[in-house]
Image (tube, rainbow, N blue to C red):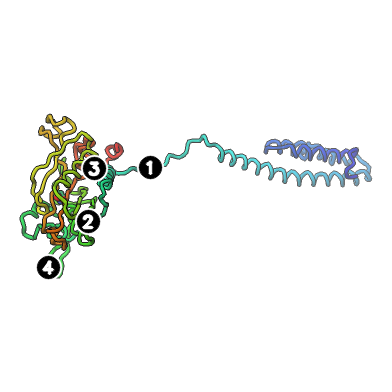
Amino acid sequence: MAGDASNPIEELKTRALEELGATDSAEALEEWRVSYLGRRGELTQVLRGLSSRSPDERRTIGAAANDAKTALEENLELRERAVKEAEVNSQLAGDAIDVTLPGWPSPSGGLHPTTRTARELCAIFASMGFQVVEGPEVEWEHYNFDSLNIPRHHPARDMWDTLWIDYTDENGDRPMLLRTHTSPMQARVMEKREPPVRVVVPGKCYRYEATDATHEWQLFQIEGLAVDKGITFADLKGTLYEFARQFFGQERRVRFRCDYFPFVEPGAEMAIDCFACAGEGCPICSGTGWIEIMGAGMVHPKVLEGVGYDPSVYTGFAFGIGVERAAMLKHGIEDIRHFYSNDLRFLRQF
Ligand code: DAH
């Protein structure tokens, strides 16, 4: 009987399976199930109608109808699974290719204005042949003071309000501190190498100091050091003048005046003409037309001797720049305390 299209049950089964193959949703499947296998479904009707048949017919038609029922049920299950899988796949595929959906914003940090400025300053000196080196923030008194011609009990130590570390050595001394400037790296670098030396040292420094608009107890400096045969004050001026023009503007003029730092002789303070008023006098330059930007000088012979360099052969210059101060001048920041108060409204401007 199988394959006999004239047989109504076989015809029903073929038609049902064909329709089943075309269903593509859960709703269509349910509709199909109801119309063939439901209580009023076609196949159900055939089985119900058996009672009015002869026993012979009942046997043959009944068997065929039961076979057909099993076949339809099995195929329904397979089709259900296939339809579900197709639905999930199309959802996934939809997700994967919807490139128009806005992505999750990934918050990206930025460099702190101090870091930015320090890098900018170092890059300028690097372009003139200076190497960038770094050193410890917890320092020995020896490097922070003695090696810089500031012996113990010398009043010059009062120039730096020092945070001492609570550590006592075997002699009962307290020789450890938070460096008050980056100058200790002068001796550390020279001890380790022979001239010529040309380095800049960016780093944090600490001072036991009350804070106000121009003072912080933590600050960032860049130390510079150049030592070789035949280095003169003209080299110092030329280098720092070039730096000032690159950082503050090509039209800048510079002024050097005598100043005292124990580790340089002669010592100088360098100022630039005020970029806000071009020397006329304004609040930024306190009416003077000039803005002091760093200390500098020719390395003191005692500093050179201390590291074993012969001061009759070698000379050099050194300088120290306050990084926050440079940033304040360049960007018109009126209070140094903004740098470390962690206010995003300030930090996001850079
Ligand atoms: N270390 C000094 C300070 O913190 C700044 C300074 C002045 C550094 C003159 C130098 C220099 O190298 O030559 O006040």
| Mark 1, residue position | 108
Mark 2 falls on what kind of element?
loop
The local secondary structure at tag 4 comes to loop
C-alpha span from label 2 to label 4: 38 Å
Q: Are marks 2 and 4 in contact (CB under 8 Å)?
A: no
Q: Residues within 10 Å of mark 1 (few under 14, many from 20)?
A: few
Camera sees residue 178: no
Asked where in the image residue 287 lies, by quadrant, the reply is top left
Q: Amino acid at mark 2?
A: Pro
Mark positioned earlier in the residue sequence (2 or 1): 1
Instruction: Give, as a three-letter code, the residue at label 1.
Output: Ser
Q: Earlier in the sequence, mark 2 or mark 4?
A: 4
Figure quadrant of the C terminus: top left
Q: Nearer the viewer, residue 201 or 196?
A: 196
121 to the left or right of 180 = right
Query: How far is disc 3 from disc 2 in space, using C-alphas?
Result: 36 Å
| CA separation in Å, label 4 and label 1 | 50 Å
**Residue at left 21%, top 44%?**
323
Considering only order in the chain, which callout, 1 or 3, is on the residue closer to the N terminus?
Answer: 1
Query: Tag 4: Cα neighbours inside 10 Å, few (<14), some, or many (≥20)?
Result: few
| Element under disc 1 | loop
Residue type of the residue flagged with mark 3 = Phe
Q: Is residue 160 left or right of residue 134?
A: left
Q: Find disc 4 in the rendering and name its residue.
A: 172
Q: Quadrant of the N terminus?
A: top right
The crowd level at tag 3 (other Cα within 10 Å; few <14, some 14-19, many 20+) is some
The residue that disc 3 covers is: 339
* Residue 332 in sight in this render: yes
Residue 331 in the image: above or below residue 259: above
